Amino acid sequence: MSFKKTIMAVAAVGALTAATAVPAMAMENEFHGLYRLFAWETNAETGGGTFNLQKDAKSSFFVEQRGRIMYIAKANDDLKLVTHFELDARFGGQSSTKYPIGDGGSLDADRVSLEMKNVYLDFKIPSTPVSMKVGIQPFSDAYQGVFGSFDAAGAVASAKLGAFTPTLGWFRIGDNNYVGRTTTASEVMPGKQSQDLIVLDGKFAVSKDLVVGASYYNVQNDKGPASVISAPATDYFLLHMLGVNASANVGPAALSAFAAYQFGDYNDTRSLSAFAGSVMAKVAVGPGKINASALYLSGNDKATGDFKSFRQLDSTGTVSYFNPSNMWLLVRNGATINSSTAIDGTDLTKGNVGMIGFFGGYELAAGKLFGSANIGYAMADKKGAASSDSMGTEVNATIGYKLYDNLTASFNAAYLFIGDGYTKAGVAAARLPGGVADADNPYMTNIQLNYVF
């Protein structure tokens, strides 16, 4: 284990010890949660987290639901245990990696389907400004989730020091059982082949209308191959990420932006050199707001030299988002359940081609009615062997009604004019990864019920 990993592990254990030293006292019990239902009609979404491009694609109808229950055991304002559980189901049942242990949506409903989402201690270290979260907890990067917005096991310390808020975190995001050169398969050693994320982040409030931030993220991958018996593991992936971000209120406009640079070792023979950047704005106009955003994620088109595709925390992109896009088909929508996917799957840089996207729309609320209309265009930063870098253009709209203070119903529709980078009439070979020649334009409609408490 590296010195840096050892320091973070010791800090986590020390923080846990400090929490258990607090005297026992009367508890307050809090319950929160949500129920969300989607009824889909689509020719592309599968209900299992995959996105199908097909020629002469047929429409299908399915319904999925999610329930979340959060219980908080609160000792006092400075100490609480947070637990968060999830129950997913598709009407009629489903057997896939999205429902690994059962699906209560099947006939007669009896299934084991309770999933653990979070279990962590949230406490303040006595006589200090430092607050700790230790355990399996939610965390989101300072870059709209393009690197990672996730739940993971770790320890996070933060403090409020006047206008400055620093954060230091460590997460163990992967751990293989290690078998040394001279040991048997039964003598496994956890922590010898691991993958860790270290986060150092700072925010400074220049004024009530301007906040600036900077961060350093480090990923150390010592996991090695899935089965290493004849030789000990070696470091083969190291990522450093430096970034800056800012948000400001200027008159009727809320503005934000970020930029990030990644460097390190992509593998044993190639270095990593990648970029990401975005600008976002919301401007009050009339009864609603105009929203606009642009996203750049660098891509790679060479087999040698520096690897230039922006890396997400998970190689498949399952924990990466860009919610300011307000898309459904071009970029996955953060509100969806197990159908959380899009034309690029869950990966914003699928095939290592990167992305350049432009998104805009208008949203408004009038009494209990609310709605929005959006348009977005995306293209690959590097098209590779494809004849076009176009991913497509999406138009979508939402109209909803607030049935109660904590229950809304909405109708959502989206249509994607698929780009030639994915398909082109008369061309047999796929273009960008996932492409299909002569594929139909994807579309979807859904009805959503959303209850929070």
Image (cartoon, rainbow, N blue to C red):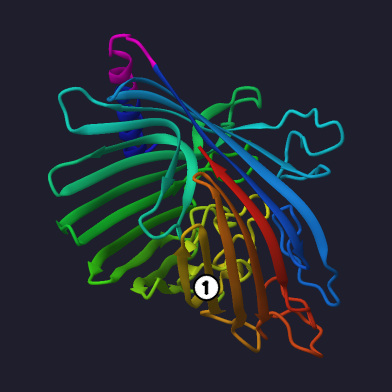
Q: Decide: few, some or many residues near mark 1? Use Cα within 10 Å; few <14, some 14-19, many ≥20.
A: many
Relative horizontal placement of residue 327, taking residue 97 as reference (left or right): left
Residue 158 in which image quadrant: top left
Relative horizontal placement of residue 328, taking residue 258 as reference (left or right): right
> Which residue is located at x 45 percent, y 41 percent?
138
Q: Nearer the viewer, residue 16 or 162?
A: 162
Relative horizontal placement of residue 111, taking residue 85 as reference (left or right): right
The local secondary structure at tag 1 comes to loop
Q: Which residue is mark 1?
A: 354
Query: x and y percent of residue 187 in the render?
Result: 60, 22
> Which residue is located at x 43 percent, y 65 percent?
272
> Which residue is located at x 52 percent, y 29 percent?
190
Query: x and y percent of residue 232 in the render?
Result: 54, 38
Quadrant placement of the N terminus: top left
Q: Amino acid at mark 1?
A: Gly
Q: Nearer the viewer, residue 178 or 374?
A: 374
Q: Is residue 75 above or below residue 352?
A: above
Q: Is residue 21 magenta?
A: yes
> Which residue is located at x 61 percent, y 46 percent?
225
Query: x and y percent of residue 428 in the render?
Result: 82, 84
**Tally of numbered tags:** 1
Which residue appears farthest toward the front when viewing the image? 367
Q: Is residue 93 magenta?
A: no
Q: Is residue 156 above or below residue 430?
A: above
Residue 301 in which image quadrant: bottom right
Residue 351 in which image quadrant: bottom right
Query: x and y percent of residue 123 in the render?
Result: 31, 27
Please indicate, yes or no, whether residue 45 appears anywhere in the rendered image: yes
- Looking at the rendering, the stretch of residues picked out in magenta corresponds to 16-27
Please indicate, yes or no, whether residue 310 appears anywhere in the rendered image: no
Relative horizontal placement of residue 108, taking residue 303 as reference (left or right): right
